[in-house]
Image (tube, grey):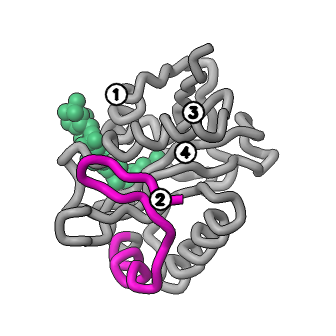
Amino acid sequence: MTLATERLLLRQWRPGDREPFAAMNADPVVMRHFPRVMTSAESDGLADRLEAGIAERGWGLWAVEVRAGGAFAGFIGLQPVTNPSMPVAPAVEIGWRLAAGFQGQGYATEGARRVVGYAFDEIALPELVSFTTVQNRASRRVMEKLGMTHDPADDFDHPTVPADWAERRHVLYRLRRSP
Ligand SMILES: CC(C)(COP(=O)(O)OP(=O)(O)OC[C@H]1O[C@@H](n2cnc3c(N)ncnc32)[C@H](O)[C@@H]1OP(=O)(O)O)[C@@H](O)C(=O)NCCC(=O)NCCS
């Protein structure tokens, strides 16, 4: 399943995405709200898992391609939250990560709006969640622009990040399908 927007394609991963994906995941600016950057082997492993998830379910965290010029820009899409140590599990998360050169142009919101439509209208999910560190204002702003709501009672310490990491506290946003 490929999703199209005015400026983007959200599509299955390709071998040629691996190199720009590894560069993005090694960029400390892109990864400033994560405990650390990724090695290229970790990045390739993540791409493999995302590709396999889409092949299996038909949906997932899609590779983002800018239609004008065909550049790989990052990922936007859906991810099942299955780890029982996550307070919100089980759930389906909407998420995004874009390379630095593609940020600040409305791409995350544009792609995510299409994903919300797909999630509610085409696979009939009842609810989407999204979470990020308290300090990640850009990601929180995308959530707000999608109409997601934040209840501070849902905030949580992320169970799989280092316990002494300064950004361990996470905010959770929710969006329910309209009846
Ligand atoms: C989060 C991310 C995907 C947003 O992508 P994007 O394409 O730049 O997002 P958009 O342009 O659609 O919207 C970003 C909004 O955040 C705002 N914003 C950006 N940086 C901000 C900051 N430091 N403080 C407050 N608002 C900020 C922008 O002004 C914009 O809001 P506006 O349209 O009201 O002006 C991108 O910053 C990114 O990849 N970050 C690194 C990876 C990451 O943290 N992913 C999320 C992990 S949960």
In the displayed structure, does residue 114 sit left or right of residue 160? left
The type of residue carrying mark 3 is Asp
The residue that mark 3 highlights is 121
Dot 1 or dot 2: first in sequence order is 2
Q: Is mark 1 within 8 Å of ligand 1?
A: yes
In the image, the segment drawn in magenta is 1-24
Q: Nearer the viewer, mark 1 or mark 4?
A: 1
Ligand 1 within 8 Å of the CB at mark 2? no
Tell me the residue at 55%/19% (across/down): 152
Circle number at residue 2: 2
Between disc 4 and disc 2, the foreground one is 2
Vertical relation: 12 (above or below) 143: below
Which is more N-terminal, label 2 or label 4? 2
Q: Which mark is residue 145?
A: 1
Q: Are marks 1 and 3 in contact (CB under 8 Å)?
A: no
User: Residue at (50%, 68%) from the top-left corner?
Assistant: 12
Q: Residue furthest top?
A: 179
Dot placed on the residue nearer the N-terminal end, 1 or 3: 3
Q: Which residue is mark 4?
A: 168
Amino acid type at mark 4: Arg
Q: Secondary structure at mark 3?
A: helix
- Residue 40 in the image: state x and y as whole percent: 46, 84
